[in-house]
Amino acid sequence: MEHIIKVEVLENLPKTRPLIAMDANWEFILLKPVPRANEIWYTSSDGNIVTPYQTSSLPEIDTNTYSNGKGIIKFKTDVTNIGNYAFENCTRLTSIEIPDSVTSIGNQTFRDCSGLTSVMIPNGVTSIEIGAFYGCNSLTSITIPDSVTSIGNRAFYSCKGLTSVTIPNSVTSIGQNTFLNCSLTSVTINSNAIVSATYTDKSNMKHIFG
């Protein structure tokens, strides 16, 4: 007997609703919705709209709404870079989901976003620049995707709640004081990243972790 799967496109469903699919073993699985290339999703501590601090570092905003527990910033063109200072000091920002179209996170993009507890770094990102998450005190863990090759100076400096970090094999450069003043108890790191660190004593990790 031939298996037939009926596929329907349902319009106007809340984006926070889980999607159901069937895997190769004919078992139902949940697929987590992801932002479109021209959207950034976020949550805020008070359930209200968060406005980017520096809009010139992003494409022009079409709409910014908050409903069903999620804020959605929709841009007029696809987002390929979260530019310098884009969300600096947005203290009400608690989580953010960035589309896969983004390839770099700029200098001090989320600096002093003290309420930020979680961030989804998409698989397309290759570089996290200087001070990108500087002072994000509420971040507790970070897993960096395999696409990332470089992490800039002080990228996670003074993330005092950060207790664990996983750095993939793709990373070959980690900047000065990247994780200084954090509370790390668990670090998974590729030795090639240590070797490529830009210091005279390349075997000494204190330049990275303090």
Image (cartoon, helix red, strand yellow):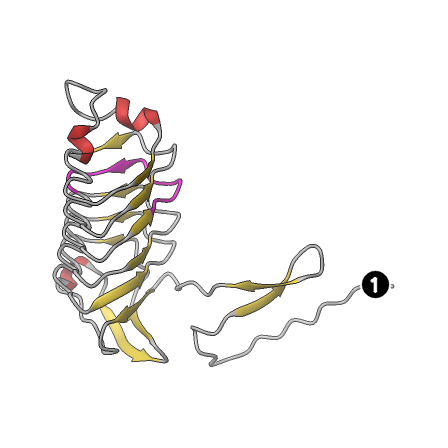
Residue 135 location (% of width, % of height): 14, 52
For the point 22% across and 58% down, the residue is 138
Q: Name the residue nearer the viewer: 48 or 101.
A: 48
In the rendered image, which quarter contains the C terminus?
Answer: top left
Residue 150 lies in the magenta-colored region: yes
Read off the magenta span.
Answer: 143-154
Residue under label 1: 2
| Residue nearest the observer in this picture, 196 or 135 | 135
Q: Is residue 41 in the magenta section?
A: no
Dot 1: within a 10 Å radius of its alpha carbon, few (fewer than 14), some, or many (20 or more) residues?
Answer: few
Q: Residue furthest right?
A: 1
Number of disc labels: 1
Is residue 75 in view from this perspective? no
Q: In which quarter of the image is the N terminus?
A: bottom right
Which secondary structure is most common in the magenta stretch? loop
The answer to whether residue 7 shows anywhere in this view is yes
Above or below, comparing residue 28 to residue 162 in the picture: below
Instruction: State the residue at coordinates (43%, 73%).
Output: 15
Query: Is 67 rendered above or below residue 59?
Result: below
Query: Is disc 1 placed on a helix, strand or loop?
Result: loop
For the residue pair 88 and 63, the one nearer the viewer reads as 88
Question: Looking at the image, which residue is at 37% across and 61% down?
Answer: 37
The residue type indicated by label 1 comes to Glu
Say whether residue 24 is left or right of residue 72. right
Q: Where is residue 95 in the image (x, y as percent from the top left)?
A: 29, 63
Residue 202 sits in which quadrant? Answer: top left
Quarter location, residue 79:
bottom left
- Name the residue: 34% across, 44% down: 144
In the rendered image, residue 60, in percent from the top left (x then y), is placed at: 22, 67
